[in-house]
């Protein structure tokens, strides 16, 4: 659920949309409603949606740790005057991108038969690193039932273990109900591949982090692949901007992985005949257009009737080359992807977050689903309550200088107190 301080601060290194829209006026209310409508659309398609609440902002504790003193009003005024970038970091609503909240290994995949969750440390960007502890606090509540779930602490908050979670995670299995191969995609491996590093933008996920996640989750079948450094330099700051996998289908750009033929061979070797890889050639959709349209940041879903569908951003529909490609793909007899739905998540997109960034996939049994705590499952009544909450508490627009308005901080606290009641979760 996109938070009330959604704004365009240009905070994210290597994220072209965030850099491009820096300083633009954001529309937090529209942003949150777009996110809710997407959830509702998926719930109506038969994909149950559990809502992750936004995080309290601004982070007065961080501002005070970094030397700003006095009342809340004084802290905001001085920070805005002397360190506006830091104030924006402490106000960021970046926890909306739950694909980065953490990594979830379903119980089918793990040695102890429990589902494991590790919140991401997100150390590659200061504003994002501020999410980790609250993500832990919220998921420890939602996944509190120890019969089914183990919630770990984030990995060590150090660059060797830089972790951005499920944005770099793909689970492949012949059926959702069978043990899968968990794949993690890293941007750098401090122990090897010294030459294969991006030159322009940072690699955010390390191999050491991927290995540690598989180890602590006790994942039975796993594989790590290196992302193509050229893709990172073209603005692909997470794997989910060049590839998306679901069940027996991997949908990937030609330049997604380093040494792609070897990467595909490793995937085939570790899976089976059932794996279907759709490789989109650069001639069909150039990498720069994949980044601009966010084609691969689509959600790839299996509907309850078994049909595989793609939930793509409207930006993909607006690029003729991409829309034409998808029309050809879905009409091809060989394609497992039979339908595309275009959804508007434009406010999030302008910060580099498409449909897939706004979701974290938890593969759960019916029993596990019933064991989640809090009022999180999106039914008509929660949808109605959350829309009303957004309409009441969110501003229509938010410009960079609005972060200096002390009323914004107060509005956020009131909104969070109200949300705690709606969702039966402790947030503050
Ligand atoms: O980390 N943008 C996020 C977008 C994350 C998208 N997530 C996935 N690909 N899964 C990021 O780059 C921009 C915030 C700002 O500039 O105000 C930001 O943090």
Image: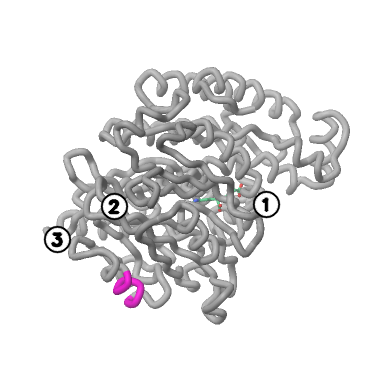
Reply above or below: 367 against 362. above
Sequence-wise, the earlier of marks 3 and 1 is: 1
- Image spot of residue 346 (x, y percent): 46, 43
Identity of the residue drawn at 63% across and 41% down: 133
The residue carrying pointer 2 sits among few (fewer than 14), some (14 to 19) or many (20 or more) residues within 10 Å by Cα, namely: some
Tags 2 and 1 touching, CB below 8 Å: no
| Label disc, if present, on residue 334 of the rendered structure | 3
Gap between marks 3 and 2, in whole Å? 25 Å
140 magenta-colored: no
* Mark in front: 3 vs 2: 2
Q: Secondary structure at mark 3?
A: loop
Gap between marks 2 and 1, in whole Å? 36 Å
Can residue 218 be seen in the rendering of this structure? yes
Identity of the residue drawn at 65% across and 54% down: 157
264 magenta-colored: yes
| Label disc, if present, on residue 179 of the rendered structure | 2
Residue hosting label 1: 126
> Which residue, as the protein is rendered here, is positioned at the far right?
70
Asked whether 247 or 83 is in front, the reply is 247
In the rendered image, which quarter contains the C terminus? top right
Gap between marks 3 and 1, in whole Å? 45 Å
* Mark in front: 2 vs 1: 2
- Image spot of residue 240 (x, y percent): 42, 56
Q: Is residue 165 left or right of residue 74?
A: left
- Image spot of residue 285 (x, y percent): 34, 65
* Mark in front: 3 vs 1: 1
Identity of the residue drawn at 26% across and 34% down: 46
User: What range is drawn magenta here?
Assistant: 261-266
Sequence-wise, the earlier of marks 2 and 1 is: 1
The quarter holding residue 219 reads bottom left
């Amino acid at each position: 659920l996109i938070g009330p301080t959604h704004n365009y601060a240009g905070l994210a290194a290597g994220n072209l949309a965030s850099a491009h829209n820096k300083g633009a006026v954001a529309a937090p209310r529209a942003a949150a409603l777009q996110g809710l409508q997407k959830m509702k659309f998926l719930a109506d398609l038969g994909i149950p949606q559990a809502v992750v609440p936004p995080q309290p902002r601004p982070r007065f504790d961080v501002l005070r740790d970094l030397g700003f003193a006095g009342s809340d009003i004084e802290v905001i005024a001085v920070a805005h005057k002397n360190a506006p970038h830091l104030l924006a970091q402490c106000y960021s609503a970046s926890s909306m991108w739950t694909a980065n909240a953490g990594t979830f290994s379903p119980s089918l995949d793990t040695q102890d038969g429990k589902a494991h969750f590790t919140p991401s440390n997100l150390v590659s960007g200061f504003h994002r690193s501020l999410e980790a502890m609250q993500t832990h606090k919220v998921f420890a509540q939602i996944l509190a039932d120890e019969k089914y779930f183990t919630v770990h602490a984030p990995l060590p908050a150090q660059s060797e273990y830089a972790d951005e979670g499920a944005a770099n995670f793909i689970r492949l299995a012949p059926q959702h109900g069978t043990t899968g191969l968990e794949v993690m995609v890293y941007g750098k491996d401090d122990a090897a591949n010294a030459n294969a590093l991006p030159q322009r933008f940072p690699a955010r996920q390390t191999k050491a982090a991927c290995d540690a996640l598989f180890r602590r989750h006790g994942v039975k079948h796993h594989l790590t692949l290196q992302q193509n450094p050229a893709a990172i330099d073209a603005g692909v700051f997470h794997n989910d901007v060049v590839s998306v996998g679901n069940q027996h289908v991997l949908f990937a750009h030609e330049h997604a992985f380093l040494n792609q033929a070897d990467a595909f061979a490793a995937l085939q070797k570790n899976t089976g005949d059932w794996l279907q890889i759709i490789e989109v050639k650069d001639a069909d959709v150039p990498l720069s257009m994949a980044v601009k349209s966010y084609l691969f940041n689509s959600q790839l879903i299996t509907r309850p009737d078994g049909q595989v569908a793609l939930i793509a951003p409207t930006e993909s529909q607006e690029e003729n080359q991409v829309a034409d490609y998808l029309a050809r793909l879905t009409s091809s007899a060989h394609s497992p992807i039979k339908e595309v739905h275009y959804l508007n998540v434009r406010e999030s997109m302008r910060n580099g977050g498409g449909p897939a960034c706004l979701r974290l996939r938890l593969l759960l049994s019916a029993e596990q689903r019933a064991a989640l705590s809090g009022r999180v499952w999106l039914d008509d009544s929660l949808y109605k309550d959350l829309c009303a909450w957004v309409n009441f508490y969110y501003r229509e627009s938010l410009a960079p200088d609005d972060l200096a308005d002390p009323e914004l901080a107060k509005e956020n606290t009131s909104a969070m107190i109200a949300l705690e009641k709606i969702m039966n979760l402790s947030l503050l």
